[in-house]
């Protein structure tokens, strides 16, 4: 088994990340030690770093692909040397939340099952990561040869999007407005388009609108709510969209997004992960216009096989979302690039 020290990007407080030498994690029975090959930089990592939302020290990074370096006693189904994608949140499947389709609220799910040291926080921004036993059992997926390390890191973020598509009950033949065409919005655009839904993509950045069209959006408009209404008139016989997905974490957009949905339609909030984030809504649109307001958070392990298949079969193109790659020593630059949306920047990868 690996012993000694490794390099890791340690979060030391608001906007402070330091490359430090830390012990390689020790593993116990049922666990796995993974040599990290790629880890995506996620919006939730950025929020925690920029706003100091959690106490330091921690090692972030939860969109992980790596090679198995060591396995604890009793692990079956995996061999040392195999390449895997790892999910950090796995529910118990037995509690009330799990039994009634709310597994992201399960107390076990809320525990982070991967760590590179300190309070478990993902651990992908390090050379090695320890995968705990319940994640080895249900949250580790073998990656086929033909799939890149970077592509395999998308299993977690694509799962969060597919779960939202199911929660929003998106159906073939419907129309959808996807507000925000960053890496997450572009995954939604692809997921909805492959299901036969007419997608109108909205984003202030031209390069993102162009990418959405390559991913089979029927049309793209800018970030101005009046443009969404114009698109709604044009593409839906003036009804409004069957489904609106708001990926931008901006509560001020909620009422405009709600207006773009048709009577009886749905608005799904994906980016509102901050608590104490109030907004005003016209209650009449919920009651008499029967619009549904839905939230979706994080991933659903029961969708893992379907998500892996979408990526491994290349039906969802994740490779072209990766615009920047950085070594671990360049983590500060990686965070800066990922935090500054502009033309030419989509998904940022760290390759430790
Ligand atoms: Zn994430
Ligand atoms: Zn549970």
Image: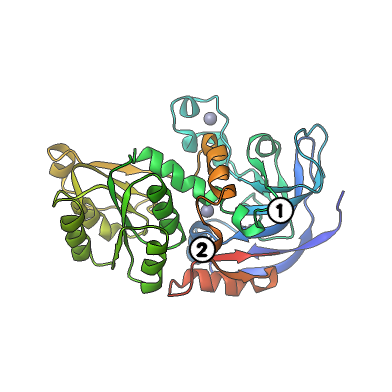
* Relative vertical location of residue 315 with respect to residue 139 in this rendering, above or below: below
Q: Residue at x 57, y 47 (%)?
A: 313
Q: Is residue 57 visible?
A: no
Q: Nearer the viewer, residue 230 or 156?
A: 230
Q: Position of residue 189 (x, y in %)?
A: 39, 54
Q: Is residue 218 left or right of residue 296?
A: left
Residue at horizontal 56 percent and vertical 34 percent from the top: 91
Q: Residues within 10 Å of mark 2 (few under 14, many from 20)?
A: some
From the viewer's perspective, is residue 231 above or below residue 328?
A: above
Residue 32 vs residue 54, the one in the foreground: 32
Look at the image and name its color scheme. Answer: rainbow
Q: Position of residue 209 (x, y in %)?
A: 36, 67
The residue lying toward the viewer, choosing from 113 and 226, is: 226
Q: Position of residue 280 (x, y in %)?
A: 21, 52
Residue of label 1: 66
Q: Is residue 85 visible?
A: yes
Q: Nearer the viewer, mark 2 or mark 1?
A: 1
Q: Element at badge 1?
A: strand
Residue placed under numbered mark 2 in the picture: 46
Kindly identify which numbered label has been placed on residue 48. Answer: none
Q: In the visual, does 101 lie left or right of 196?
A: right
- The CA distance from mark 2 to mark 1 is 22 Å
Residue found 48% across the figure and 71% down from its top = 345
Q: Which of the image's four quarters has the C terminus?
A: bottom right
Is label 2 in a helix, a strand or a loop? Answer: helix
């Amino acid at each position: 088994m690996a012993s000694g020290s490794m390099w890791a990007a340690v979060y030391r407080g608001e906007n402070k990340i330091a490359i430090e030498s830390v012990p390689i994690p020790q593993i116990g029975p049922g666990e796995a030690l993974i040599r990290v090959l790629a880890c995506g930089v996620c919006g939730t990592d950025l929020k925690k770093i920029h706003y100091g939302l959690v106490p330091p020290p921690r090692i972030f990074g939860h969109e992980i692909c790596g090679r198995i370096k060591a396995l604890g006693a009793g692990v079956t189904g995996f061999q040392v040397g195999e390449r895997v994608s790892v999910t950090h949140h796995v529910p118990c499947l037995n509690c009330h939340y799990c039994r009634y389709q709310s597994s992201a609220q399960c107390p076990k799910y809320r525990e982070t099952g991967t760590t590179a040291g300190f309070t478990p926080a993902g651990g992908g921004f390090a050379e090695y990561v320890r995968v705990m036993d319940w994640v080895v059992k249900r949250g580790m997926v073998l990656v086929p040869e033909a799939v890149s390390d970077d592509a395999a890191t998308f299993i977690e973020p694509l799962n969060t999007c597919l779960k939202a598509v199911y929660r929003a009950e998106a159906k073939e033949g419907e129309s959808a407005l996807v507000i925000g065409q960053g890496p997450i919005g572009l995954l939604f655009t692809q997921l909805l388009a492959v299901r036969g839904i007419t997608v109108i993509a909205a984003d202030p950045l031209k390069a993102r609108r162009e990418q959405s069209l390559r991913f089979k959006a029927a049309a793209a408009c800018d970030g101005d709510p009046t443009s969404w209404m114009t698109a709604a008139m044009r593409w839906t016989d003036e009804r409004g969209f069957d489904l609106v997905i708001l990926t931008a974490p901006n509560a001020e957009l909620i009422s405009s997004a709600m207006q773009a949905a048709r009577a009886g339609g749905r608005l799904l909030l994906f980016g509102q992960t901050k608590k104490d984030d109030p907004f005003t809504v016209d209650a009449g649109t919920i009651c008499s216009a029967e619009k549904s307001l839905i939230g979706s958070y994080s991933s659903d392990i029961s969708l893992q096989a379907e998500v892996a298949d979408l990526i491994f079969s290349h039906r969802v193109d994740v490779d072209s979302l990766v615009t920047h790659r950085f070594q671990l020593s360049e983590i500060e630059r990686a965070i800066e690039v990922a935090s500054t949306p502009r033309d030419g920047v989509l998904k940022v990868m760290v390759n430790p």
